[in-house]
Image (cartoon, grey):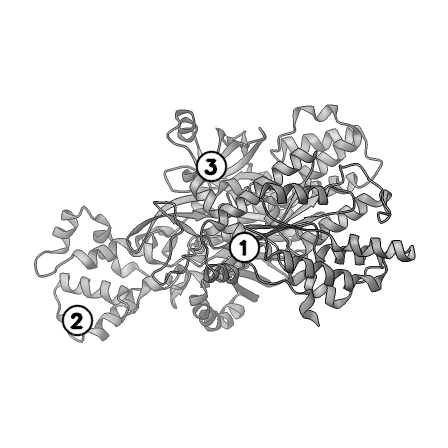
Amino acid sequence: MEKKYKQQPSNCIKVVLFGPESTGKTTLSKQLAKHYNTVWVPEYAREYLQNKWNAEQKTCQPKDLLPIAEGQMKLENELVKKANSVLICDTDLLETKVYSEAYYLGTCDPILQKFALENTYDLYFLTYIDTPWEADDLRDKPNERSRMFKAFETALKKHNKPYVLLKGNKIERLEMAINHIDKLLKNKALNFTEKDQNQIKSKGLTINQIEGQVNRIKNGMSYSNLVAAANIGSGIESYSEQEIKEFIDLYEEMQDNLNIVKFVPASGAATRMFKFLFQFLSQFNPEHETIESYAKKHNDNLIITFISNFEKFPFYNQIVLKAKAINPNFDKLNKNEAVLGLVKAMLNEDALNYSFFPKGLLPFHKYKNGAVTAFYDHLFETTLYASSKNKANLHFTVSEKHHSCFTAELNNIINELEQKTNTTFNVSFSYQKEETETVALTENNEVYRNEDGSILFRPAGHGALLENLNDLNSDLVFIKNIDNIVVFNKNEKLNKYKKLIAGVLLKVQEQTFSFLHQLDNASVNEAEMLNMAMFLSKKMNVSIFDEFDDLTLEKKKQYLKEKLNKPIRVCAMVKNEGEPGGGPFWVKDMHGDMSLQIVEFAQIDIENPSQAEIVKNATHFNPTDLVCGIKNYKGARFNLLNFVDKEAAFITDKTQNGIAIKALELPGLWNGSMANWNTIFVEVPLATFNPVKTVNDLLKPEHQV
């Protein structure tokens, strides 16, 4: 019986005109069918209900809905056989479902509900209520068009249906609809097979999204429009010792009443840490050269530093034991052979295979009782500033293949750490989600495929982690990279700067929430709103548009609420002394609004002399050390995906199996992914930034006890 409500498979594109009565759906259906020389599916309900009215003088009743749904799908399944590349549908079962719920106390027949959601279309055109009402025998709610439009819009959003809002006169609507259908046809021309479509669907992606990725790569990167470098007094706050103490005191007063988590991106493999050692393995021949002659020949001072300080590395004992286990005659080797043996013990797949592991699981620091991993010290560090009531929450984003390794390390260390720190640790893990992965193009702008013909999907950079961050439900989130961790005795002196930025956030958040509650009060006056605008401008670095003073009282309230009701981030900034990292800049967007942003070097058109000059004058950079407020003034989580600048995506040149490809990375987590947050930059000492980019960085004083 249910087969008669089911959509028949088809290779053509299907679009639906969707919206309340008298919004031009039938007119547009006919226009589109004529434009594409195809057929259109009329609304069966009109024929059915007109016949009922003529016979009984009665309008629609709940018992009519299934016969209407059956008739509608019979029409669609017959006409799809006659369509060329596009089928235009004047309605669908989801529209019938909306009317059922709107007219009959929120109810919908289970069979209608099932097929309203299961039947799929490439695109919905949501028709707005800016067309004149035209009465007839069947239309009966001219005064409820706004309510009905909202019901239609809500249905599309709730069930994740792809849609475009159509407004304007008949010509404007037709042009917009044609533009979007042409894009669908172009996408179909990408020649995605049924196998491709199944692969795309299995990733949680749609054909439209893949088309968007392809077009973004083809169109190239959108560079940031730098206006000026942020510095002390213009975008970066610098506090006296007394002010720092006050912010720390504020944070410590509130700390035990907050749900706090430290969010640590930790999925990156350690391969690049050992790049110079891999080159050494492939090029060094102990029978024909010494370490010193190799270093001179290849201008490689890193290998000399590595060997000269080998005993200082936290993994020294482990490597030596492994080398001796591999070669029982290790102690009889000459210096050159011994060094080669040690590096092989460290990196070979059949030995310790260090480059396979993520940085978080490598020995990072050596204490009296032995070496510990970066993962261990991140847990330890959390007790210094990010715990609450002797409980510490940490969330690590890891690769799926390393999850079990992290879990094993956690089980190995947690009892000792909990006893040592008198803290209970709640540690969770997540992976980059498959739906954040992106395609790549060849030099000929064709979608790159693997040897088996499947589409290559690549991880989309750390911007993909916004989805993971969005799943958290905490009052405060500290974000810090896995490799930026120092030995504990030095960390004790630096933790106050984490408390500083948390205190800054709490103070500004408290004022923001107070203003938002005021704006909910109908009695807020002009003077109070002017004070809010000044706060946004002076404390939150938000540009207030020039016409603000000319707005009505109600429009001012809406404007201020929109600007205030956003996630807040406070980012540490350190003086630029040549270290790599994104910089703090004033940036102008396409609407002419200025805001503070963290901009990566790859986002800057350095060939533009004016942009290059701004970069040259930059005084600070971002060490990826920030604290975030991700809940609104009512205590609900923001949907962080709503605050992304999608134009800030990265396009990078890569190689895949020796073939040059153009890869797409999502806007960086603390770059474009947070572009529309409210942002404050705070200067902290350079000593807070101690990343481990190469293995030799572990020799720096900050990583030595």
Residue 320 in view, yes or no: yes
Residues at discs 2 and 1 in contact (Cβ within 8 Å): no
State the mark number for residue 222.
3
Of residues 439 and 332, the one drawn nearer to the viewer in this rendering: 439
Q: Which SS class for mark 3?
A: loop
Using the numbered discs, state the Cα–Cα distance from disc 2 to disc 3 in whole angstroms.
56 Å
Q: Where is residue 596 in the image (x, y as percent from the top left)?
A: 55, 35
Q: How crowded is mark 1: few (under 14 residues within 10 Å), some or many (20 or more)?
A: some
- Residue 618 drawn above or below residue 156: above
Disc 1 marks which amino acid?
Thr
Q: Is residue 546 left or right of residue 228?
A: right
Q: Name the residue under label 2.
A: 330
Q: Which of marks 2 and 3 is in front?
A: 3
Q: Position of residue 181 (x, y in %)?
A: 57, 45
Displayed quadrant of residue 343: bottom left
Neighbor class of circle 3 (other Cα within 10 Å; few <14, some 14-19, many 20+) is: some
Helix, strand or loop at disc 1? loop
First in sequence: mark 2 or mark 3? 3
Left or right of 356 on screen, residue 630: right
Circle 3 or circle 1, nearest the eye: 1
> Visible in this render: residue 676?
no
Residue at the right extreme of this rendering: 57
In this orientation, which residue lies closer to the viewer: 427 or 124? 124
Which of the pair 353/499 is nearer the observer? Answer: 353
* Marks 2, 1: nearer the viewer: 1
Disc 2 marks a residue whose amino acid type is Phe
Image coords of residue 506 (percent x, y):
65, 46
In the rendered view, tell whether residue 581 sits above or below residue 589: below
* Residue 679, horizontal then vertical, whole percent: 58, 40
Q: Disc 1 designates what residue?
A: 206
Mark 2 near mark 3, Cβ–Cβ under 8 Å?
A: no
